[in-house]
Image: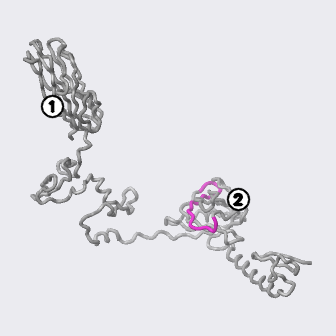
């Protein structure tokens, strides 16, 4: 009776007529001794694999594999991963009991005992086929009831998903040694101190820093970031022997020596955080500022009417804080300067008793002028007024006029009447 069997991937037969099997693996016939020799080689290979994959070692636990991924107890003697794409898994869910019913709780709970960031290495190997495996670094162990969630990151694999449900899997764990003591200080500090000086830094240069928000871990800061943070403009610290360029300003420090800084632009000003704290140069091109001219507005006051003047011809409106009609709205808290030139027509006769120009803000009313009007030869009056006031963000300011003592015949002259203002500091 003929027999056929397969071992280590090779098929052997006792039937010389079985042409599906190479002659080197037929026991009966010319190649008998060759077939016997090949069988001996295969038996040694199988025995070696069995020894290699034996359930022995420092920490080796046998499980049955399950392709499910849910975060629940996988069941007695079962191991699963948290991702159907097995090499992308970040958690191993291992039951507290191994495949043979042994309680492995105390062993699993040691997997994160190392004080190193990577606690150890786990290899998952198919017991009967060592060519199928996954390797992970271990970072933590969570302890839900009945099983353990082992946090991992894949470091190697034989295939993306080498296991199927029911495979007998060997979990092998190798512990990482504890983190060593902190060594003597500061190779970075020592190396930085010993390095050559660079006279002119460029934007891509890096400066080491101990990050207080990350347990004082080592980070670097780009020179471009330092310039932006401190508000520096290119060329701010360039010294000037006699004040070349668009201008320079001198500062006297605690000693009598003078420090000279060159401003990079005619519109630049010096930014400070106090009388003695210089932080850089700022350009005023973003400061709120406006100038608007009035159109003719006829017969608006004269009879004690308190009239808000409209200024619809906007010459400039830097920052967009003027509404194009009458109202300036502060975008930031600070000191603001305003000017209004009143151009009035219709002041004929002697009945008018007073002209009162006003700047009305959210917080105060500034009476710019108390004027005994009396008679005007040509009926016109031109008055320039200025005020400096504090405004909070969101406060508003308008220019008003009231003429008292007669009838409503006083008008606003176009163009000559203007309203302007800006944030100064």
Residue 25 left/right relative to 109: right
Q: Main secondary structure of the magenta part?
A: strand
In percent of the image, x 34 and y 60: which residue is there? 221
Instruction: State the mark number for residue 76.
Output: 2
In the displayed structure, 133 sits above or below 403; it is below
Res. 372 image quadrant? top left
Res. 365 image quadrant? top left
Along the line of sight, which residue is nearer the eye, 267 or 159?
A: 267
Res. 188 image quadrant? bottom left
Along the line of sight, which residue is nearer the eye, 61 or 236?
A: 236
In the displayed structure, 122 sits above or below 366; it is below
Instruction: State the mark number for residue 378.
Output: none
Residue 377 left/right relative to 17: left
Query: Magenta part of the protein: which range?
Result: 143-159
In percent of the image, x 18 and y 27: which residue is there? 417
Residue 97 left/right relative to 216: right
* Numbered disc total: 2
**What quarter of the picture does the C terminus occupy?**
top left
- Magenta span includes 331: no
Q: What residue is shown with label 1?
A: 386
Along the line of sight, which residue is nearer the eye, 397 or 326?
A: 326
Q: Position of residue 283 (x, y in %)?
A: 23, 47
Marks 2 and 1, the one that precedes in the sequence: 2
Q: Position of residue 98 (x, y in %)?
A: 69, 64
Residue 25 left/right relative to 256: right
In percent of the image, x 75 and y 80: which residue is there? 42
């Amino acid at each position: 009776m003929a027999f056929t069997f397969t071992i280590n991937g090779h098929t052997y037969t006792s039937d010389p007529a079985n042409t599906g099997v190479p002659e080197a693996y037929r026991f009966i016939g010319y190649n008998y001794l060759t077939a016997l020799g090949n069988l001996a080689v295969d038996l040694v290979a199988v025995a070696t694999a069995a020894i290699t994959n034996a359930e022995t070692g420092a920490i080796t636990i046998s499980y049955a594999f399950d392709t499910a991924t849910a975060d629940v107890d996988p069941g007695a003697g079962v191991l699963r991963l948290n991702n159907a794409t097995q090499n992308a898994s970040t958690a191993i869910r291992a039951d507290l009991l191994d495949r043979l019913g042994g309680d492995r709780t105390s062993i699993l709970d040691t997997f994160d005992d190392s004080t190193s960031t990577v606690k150890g290495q786990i290899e998952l190997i198919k017991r009967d086929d060592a060519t199928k495996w996954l390797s992970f670094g271990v970072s933590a162990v969570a302890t839900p009831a009945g099983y353990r969630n082992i946090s991992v990151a894949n470091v190697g694999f034989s295939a993306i998903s080498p296991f199927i449900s029911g495979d007998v899997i060997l979990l092998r764990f190798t512990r990482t040694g504890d983190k060593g003591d902190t060594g003597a200080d500061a190779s970075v500090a020592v190396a930085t101190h010993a390095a050559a000086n660079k006279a002119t830094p460029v934007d891509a240069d890096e400066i080491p820093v101990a990050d207080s928000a990350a347990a004082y871990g080592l980070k670097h800061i780009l020179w471009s970031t330092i310039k932006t943070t401190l508000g520096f403009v290119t060329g701010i610290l360039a010294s000037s022997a006699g004040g070349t360029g668009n201008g320079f300003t001198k500062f006297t420090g605690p000693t009598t020596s003078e420090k000279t800084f060159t401003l990079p632009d005619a519109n630049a000003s010096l930014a400070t955080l106090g009388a003695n704290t210089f932080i850089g140069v700022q350009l005023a091109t973003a400061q709120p500022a406006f100038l608007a001219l009035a159109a003719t507005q006829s017969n608006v006051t004269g009879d004690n009417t308190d009239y808000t003047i409209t200024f619809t011809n906007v010459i400039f409106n830097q920052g967009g804080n003027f509404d194009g009609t009458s109202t300036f709205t502060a975008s930031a808290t600070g000191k603001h300067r305003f000017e209004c030139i009143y151009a009035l027509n219709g002041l004929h006769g002697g009945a008018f008793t007073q002209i009162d120009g006003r700047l009305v803000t959210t917080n105060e009313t500034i009476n710019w002028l108390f004027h005994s009007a009396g008679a005007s030869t040509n009926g016109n009056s031109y008055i320039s007024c200025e005020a400096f006031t504090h405004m909070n963000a969101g406060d508003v300011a308008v220019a008003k006029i009231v003429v008292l003592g007669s009838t409503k015949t006083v008008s606003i002259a176009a163009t000559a009447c203007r309203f302007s203002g800006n944030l100064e500091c």
